[in-house]
Image: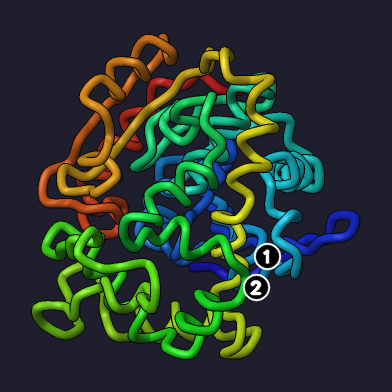
């Protein structure tokens, strides 16, 4: 990847990792949790070689971007403002946005609210509309109801402090277990067997079947993730990422006004066949997305990939992404 570049917008600093080969349109990559701009390392050169300008962000709260302390700073409208500011600072009027996990939620929302700046949108792992769920149920209320019966990480993450300390004090162990658990080879333990009281997230993440390196993740890669998360110290290495969970209610309220908005721009959806998100979806989730995203040009489930499909099956992912990009007519 190229040398780090950065821009400053009013009250906030965003770190940009980018390759600027080619003179084509801008493609902006937005990661989720636990990700970084580095999570797109296998896409950057491929997209640049296809004649686009590839740009991956360390999102708000991650890596070398600023990490606002209070979780309220992480709601969807602030994140959208970050993306708008990036376009403005680069002198661009629109871009293709590719998002994974929380990044997928973000780029879908951006496309629904501001289609005029979105030349195309790619949701990875999370289909359009899935994050909203039942609009009548406040997210933290639903999390608490589940957490009353057994451990549920979405509920555990809501309280500032316990998860921050547990995960930050064991950064490498946490990242290794979570990357494994969400991969095609890994498995998530049955959380219903663990009570909420006295259970931490590491308790429900199994040890990998074999140590690094894995086919898709090296020890050097893991070193990079750990070092970037620990930039702010081992007390709150993951607080920025956890704050994305803590704005669930705020986002739920902010998204109500846009709940009926469809995606009108060219779109694609890519996921791994073994992605836990895909397995947890209702049977008709993909059908609903197809109805609400009429210009869905790519809808691909890639075999032998879990949640981190762009890393686990990079070649297949890149093929789908390049096919989608080739359908776009952007000046």
The residue at the point 23 percent across, 48 percent down is: 275
Residue nearest the viewer, comparing 142 with 237: 142
- The mark total stands at 2
Residue 217 numbered mark, or none? none
Residue 142 image offset from top left, x and y in percent = 46, 42
Along the line of sight, which residue is nearer the eye, 114 or 239?
239
Where residue 317 appears, x then y in whole percent?
27, 44
Residue 152 in picture, x, y percent from top left: 37, 58
Figure check: 314 above or below 292: below
Of residues 154 and 223, the one nearer the viewer is: 154
In which quarter of the view is residue 206 placed?
bottom left
Cα distance, mark 1 to mark 2? 5 Å
**As drawn, is 253 to the left or to the right of 274?**
right
Q: Residues within 10 Å of mark 1 (few under 14, many from 20)?
A: many
Q: Image point 60% across, 22% down: which residue?
A: 112
Quarter of the figure with residue 17? bottom right
What is the image's colouring?
Answer: rainbow
Q: Which residue is at the far right?
A: 10
Query: Which residue lies at the image location 18% right of the left edge and 51% below the top edge?
Result: 305
Position of 311 compared to 60: left or right? Answer: left
Q: Is residue 156 among the parts visible in the rendering? A: yes
Q: In the figure, 305 relative to 121: above or below? A: below
Which sits earlier in the primary sequence, circle 1 or circle 2?
1
Instruction: Name the residue tied to disc 2.
Output: 64
Q: Where is mark 1, residue-wise?
A: 15
Callout 2: helix, strand or loop? loop
Secondary structure beneath disc 1? strand
Q: Residue at x 29, y 59 (%)?
A: 311
The one nearer the camera, 5 or 99, is 99
Q: Give percent across and percent down for residue 288.
A: 34, 16
Contact between labelled residues 2 and 1, with CB atoms less than 8 Å apart? yes
Quadrant for the C terminus in the image = top right
């Amino acid at each position: 990847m190229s040398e780090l570049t950065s821009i400053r917008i009013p009250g906030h600093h965003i770190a940009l990792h980018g390759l600027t080969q080619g003179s084509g349109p801008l493609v902006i990559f937005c990661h989720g949790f636990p990700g970084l701009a580095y999570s797109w390392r296998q896409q950057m050169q491929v997209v640049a070689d296809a004649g686009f300008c590839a740009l991956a962000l360390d999102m708000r709260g991650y890596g070398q971007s600023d990490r606002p302390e209070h979780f309220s700073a992480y709601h969807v409208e602030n994140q959208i403002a970050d993306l708008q500011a990036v376009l403005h600072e680069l002198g661009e009027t629109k871009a293709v946005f590719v998002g994974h996990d929380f990044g997928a939620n973000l780029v879908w929302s951006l496309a629904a609210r501001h289609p005029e700046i979105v030349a195309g949108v790619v949701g990875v792992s999370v289909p359009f509309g899935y994050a909203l769920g039942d609009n009548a149920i406040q997210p933290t209320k639903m999390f608490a109801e589940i957490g009353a019966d057994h451990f549920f990480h979405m509920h555990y993450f809501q309280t500032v402090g316990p998860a921050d300390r547990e995960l930050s004090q064991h950064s490498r162990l946490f990242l290794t277990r979570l990357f494994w658990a969400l991969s095609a080879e890994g498995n998530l333990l049955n959380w219903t067997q663990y009570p909420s009281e006295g259970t931490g997230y590491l308790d429900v993440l199994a040890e990998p079947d074999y140590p690094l390196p894995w086919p898709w993740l090296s020890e050097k890669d893991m070193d990079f993730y750990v070092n970037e998360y620990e930039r702010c110290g081992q007390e709150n290495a993951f607080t920025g990422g956890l704050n994305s969970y803590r704005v669930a209610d705020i986002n739920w309220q902010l998204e109500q006004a846009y709940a009926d908005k469809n995606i009108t721009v060219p779109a694609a959806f890519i996921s791994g066949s073994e992605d836990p998100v895909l397995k947890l979806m209702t049977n008709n989730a993909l059908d609903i997305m197809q109805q609400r995203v009429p210009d869905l040009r790519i809808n691909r489930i890639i075999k032998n990939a879990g949640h981190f499909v762009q890393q686990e099956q990079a070649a297949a992912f890149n093929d789908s992404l390049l096919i989608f990009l080739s359908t776009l007519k952007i000046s």
